Image (tube, coloured by chain):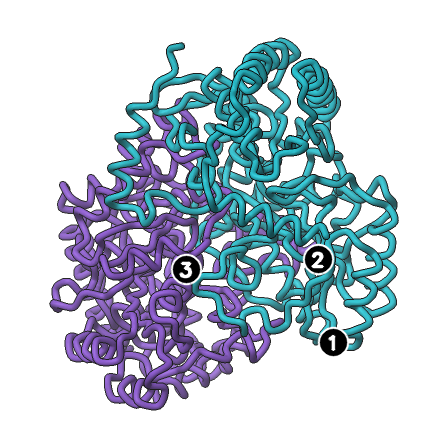
Chain colours: A cyan, B purple
């Protein structure tokens, strides 16, 4: 096997000198199997090359942003054309208006749109707008649900005060009864209820979008005068060309959208319904690069492809092929997988794998065979993925299952002791 | 005069339908004279064209990011080369390590670096790291000083709870005595003291970097075990090739840097001293696009120019030419200007102008003559500005002074009633 990682190891050593912990945030490999590459060199379509030039079929898609394939030609052309004009200027470019018009035309829960950079910008803005709109304080969020990395929501406790979350109230994610109880407990002081379109947290099985929960969340918010915020930062445009709950007949008041809008260009958005417009225009939110034109040009091009192509049906088809292929392979090798959530956003966990020794070994074996799979985070299908790519993926995973089966199970390494803690926390959330 | 704004007016009408308030944040023209263009089409070097294709010599530089001139060729080439490889990937590119090494090599208060997108990301991260480091709660900030637009610091009160600022303590900006009193009042519970390199707030005269204040802030933090955070988001690399207080012999523990690092590409940073490294590696902070490679490639190219060119001396020379030229013009026309702060970041206010009627009329007259000046926000000189550009600027401002002098002063319009309120607030801060 030609897979090597010496350049990556050298970069990690250099990084450890000048970056705290060598790397930080969601793209840190600190919790991943030791062989996973930390640094990458290039990407094209559905392929990714690491710093050692190992090639991967990439199922992480930059943790979401890559919807149409890396360096998608029409989006890249739009980026280059806008670069010739200008990017970060003394005011927005006219393309900001076009982009807002496109969002409002495409999304049933959008009467207006605001743009920012990262998902955390959009979700944090939603809390401020909801409080301005209602004059109330409490923000209800699903326990263990990721809404960003600001003090009110970051999953890491270091440096966070209890006061940062003094008005954050937790309900059991995707559970209408638990939400109803939380609403009752804080009635009269609820600014917003946050939800995700379906459960897509690390170390846990995913759920599917749930009409019962969505409708109950809407009903409770209406009864209470609270703002319903649907956090689609991770799922936007992978489930639907409209909002993720449009098919369920539920309109959130505010929808945070991120990652995919510019197919990798840095832009996120908060869209909302008419009654929230006044509060949205009353808050002071901004950022040095929120009004840059190039990511907006990329977004206009991306949204056009979303409207006019069969990208969504392709995501569904290749996602289903992968899921069915893996299930058959696992069974043939005597393993059982829990493949959960929409096929376009696969989460793959092993049954009977309390410390993830199977999942970690298998994902690392796939990585060394040119398929980048994640052992604990949901993955993402992109529209450049072909049936041939899936077939090539399945060859690698078949070899990975074979390698796993050949291992003495008791001797499988526990890659990261901290994983056990994460799993226990996830189990508590599901209990 | 060929200046027109019909296209801008049409875009503003369309924007009002789909963007709350028609525009938001620091690039909104809501507080500016009515003629100021809201939307722009393109930029090159020191020139900016609005949606109606009016050309301006731009003294706002995108509110800072444009340090070397729009579309600076070497930075643009680095952007294009990195785009061929990849931008937002499943992990950082190796250029992240190079960029962190460059920052550490160039900045005396940097033993490590973390990258993010906007200034608010960097300042908010500093609060979390300071609290993780000290285990304490209070953050001391100068009253009225802008450190970003998150709930703990945004200047807009809508949607903000008193609890969001329950542990924010205000001292009189740049005043060592006031800072000492605030430290004494909260001794034992102070996580951080924030400062800016000099005063550069809207509607107020600027100050110069002040060694007495800087040294006293350092001394108080040392005595108290608090973290000294220097917020250089606005001023970075316009005063110095090193940190802004390096020339004063003062090293902050953490320095937030923004706007200029990628000459307009979206990237900001937090750098810090060795004792803060452990806390920095303990916090969970991240964003979908924080690790994108293209802005880092732009930053490596920008920092190289900062190290190797005379850009800083050019900023100082053209900034001084402009200041001296304007002072002479104003005197010749019978006006007195308050031109404050470093010449590279001009703030221009009129004496004896309690409601800014003079300043607003004069800036609008300059805009209609092809020079984009700001009536209440500090401006920014970029390194593409030539002595010829300054001469052309002074022709336009001379005509603007002539037009102002011809006006019946009592009949000058009060462009925005809210300006009076802002001025009163600024005056209170200075009292």
Chain name for mark 2? A
* Lateral position of residue B218 relative to residue A295, left or right: left
* Camera sees residue B27: yes
B161 relative to A117, above or below: below
| B112 displayed left or right of B29 | left
Q: Is residue B18 visible?
A: no
- Residue sitting at x 51%, y 82%: B421
**SS at mark 2 in the image:** strand
Secondary element type, mark 3: helix
The residue under the point 26% across, 84% down is B175
Q: Position of residue A59 (x, y in %)?
A: 57, 26
Rounded to the nearest angstrom, the CA distance separating label 3 from label 1 is 29 Å
Q: Residues within 10 Å of mark 3 (few under 14, many from 20)?
A: many
Q: Are marks 2 and 3 in contact (CB under 8 Å)?
A: no
Q: Height in image: A41 above or below A120? A: above
Residue B354 x, y percent position in the rendering: 41, 84
State how far apart marks 2 and 3 are (Cα).
Answer: 24 Å
At which x and y percent is residue B98? Answer: 26, 37
Disc 3 marks which residue? B125
Location of mark 2 (residue): A194
Quarter occupied by residue B290:
top left
Dot 2 or dot 1, earlier in sequence: 1
**Which residue bears the numbered disc 1?**
A189
């Amino acid at each position: 096997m030609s897979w090597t990682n010496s350049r990556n190891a050298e970069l990690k050593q250099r990084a450890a000198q000048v970056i705290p912990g060598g790397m930080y945030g969601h793209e840190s490999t600190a919790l991943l199997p030791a062989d996973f590459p930390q640094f990458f060199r290039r990407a094209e379509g559905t392929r990714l090359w690491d710093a050692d030039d190992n090639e991967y079929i990439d199922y992480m898609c930059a943790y979401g942003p890559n919807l149409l394939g890396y360096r998608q030609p029409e989006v890249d052309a739009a980026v280059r054309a806008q670069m010739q004009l200008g990017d970060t200027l003394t005011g927005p470019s006219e393309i900001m208006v076009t982009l807002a018009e496109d969002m409002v035309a495409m999304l049933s829960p959008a009467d207006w749109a605001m743009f920012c950079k990262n998902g955390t910008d959009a979700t944090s803005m939603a809390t401020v707008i909801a409080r301005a709109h209602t004059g109330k304080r409490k923000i209800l969020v699903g326990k263990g649900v990721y809404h960003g990395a600001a003090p009110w929501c970051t999953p890491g406790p270091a440096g966070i005060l209890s006061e940062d979350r003094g008005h954050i109230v937790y309900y059991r994610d995707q559970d209408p009864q638990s939400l109803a109880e939380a609403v009752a407990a804080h009635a009269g002081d609820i600014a917003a209820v946050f939800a995700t379109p379906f459960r897509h947290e690390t170390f846990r099985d995913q759920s599917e979008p749930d009409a019962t929960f969505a409708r109950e969340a809407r009903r409770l918010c209406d009864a209470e005068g609270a703002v319903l915020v649907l956090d689609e930062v991770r799922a936007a445009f992978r489930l639907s060309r409209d909002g993720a709950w449009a098919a369920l007949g539920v309109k959130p008041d505010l929808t945070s959208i991120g990652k995919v809008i510019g197919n990798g260009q840095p832009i996120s958005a908060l869209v909302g319904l008419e009654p929230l417009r006044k509060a949205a225009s009353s808050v002071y939110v901004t950022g040095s690069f929120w009004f840059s034109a190039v990511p907006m040009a990329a977004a206009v091009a991306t949204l056009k492809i979303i409207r006019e192509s069969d990208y969504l049906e392709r995501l569904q088809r290749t996602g289903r092929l992968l899921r069915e292929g893996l299930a058959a392979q696992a069974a043939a090798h005597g393993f059982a997988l829990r493949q959960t959530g929409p096929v376009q956003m696969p989460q793959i966990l092993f049954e009977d794998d309390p410390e993830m020794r199977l999942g970690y070994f298998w994902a690392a074996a796939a990585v060394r065979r040119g398929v980048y799979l994640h052992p604990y985070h949901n993955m993402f299908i992109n529209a450049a993925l072909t049936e041939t790519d899936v077939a090539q993926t399945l060859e690698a995973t078949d070899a990975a299952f074979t390698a796993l089966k050949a291992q003495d199970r008791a001797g499988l390494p526990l890659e990261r002791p901290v994983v056990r803690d994460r799993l226990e926390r996830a189990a508590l959330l599901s209990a």
